[in-house]
Amino acid sequence: MSEVLDPQQNIINSFHNYESWEDKYKHIINLGKTLAPLEEKFKTEDNIVKGCQSQVWLVASVNSKNKIEFKGDSDAIIVKGLLALVLSIYNNLSASEILKTEPTFLKTLELSEHLSPSRSNGLFAMIKKIKYYGLAFHALEGQG
């Protein structure tokens, strides 16, 4: 279980390097810059994360190790950073690990209290879609 929690602890530790929320927002923006741009062919209606005020696209595939790989993008820089945070936790986990992993870092960092309601809703919509992918791939594993 510590393997699953480790990325969240890394996020918490990285945020402790910044005192002000302005600096934390800059950190989030910089994280977004680390996400590779999503190919245009994936920016479709099916891949849009519903519930986000900004455009957010999320795609998932299963790799040869039966881990789920996510790719995503957003047209808003802070939202893209939030997506990078979330993907750093859930990327390359198995379907069952995704379903078991709760985003505890959000409460620890009080992140949703420092985001606008629409960004906070969008953040939870991203997590919900990731969990949906986890559930879908978990169901497919059961059929295999």
Image (spheres, rainbow, N blue to C red):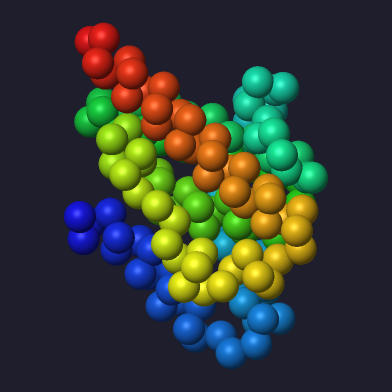
Q: Can residue 27 be seen in this view?
A: yes
Q: In this view, does 92 lie to the left or right of 111?
A: left
Residue, far bottom: 19
Q: Which residue is rendered at x = 65% and y = 87% of the image? A: 20
Q: What is the quadrant of the N terminus in the image?
A: bottom left
Q: Which residue is rendered at x = 42% and y = 62% of the image? A: 104
Tell me how many marks there are: 0
Q: Is residue 144 left or right of residue 79?
A: left
Q: Which residue is rendered at x = 59% and y = 48% of the image? A: 124
Percent position of residue 83, x then y:
58, 51
Task: Name above or below for residue 130 compared with residue 110.
Answer: above
Q: Dividing the picture into quarters, in which one does residue 135 lie? A: top left
Percent position of residue 34, x then y:
56, 57
**127 or 93: nearer the viewer:** 127
Q: Dividing the picture into quarters, in which one does residue 103 lie? A: bottom left
Q: Is residue 32 visible?
A: no
Percent position of residue 21, x then y:
67, 81
Task: Name above or below for residue 126 compared with residue 5.
Answer: above
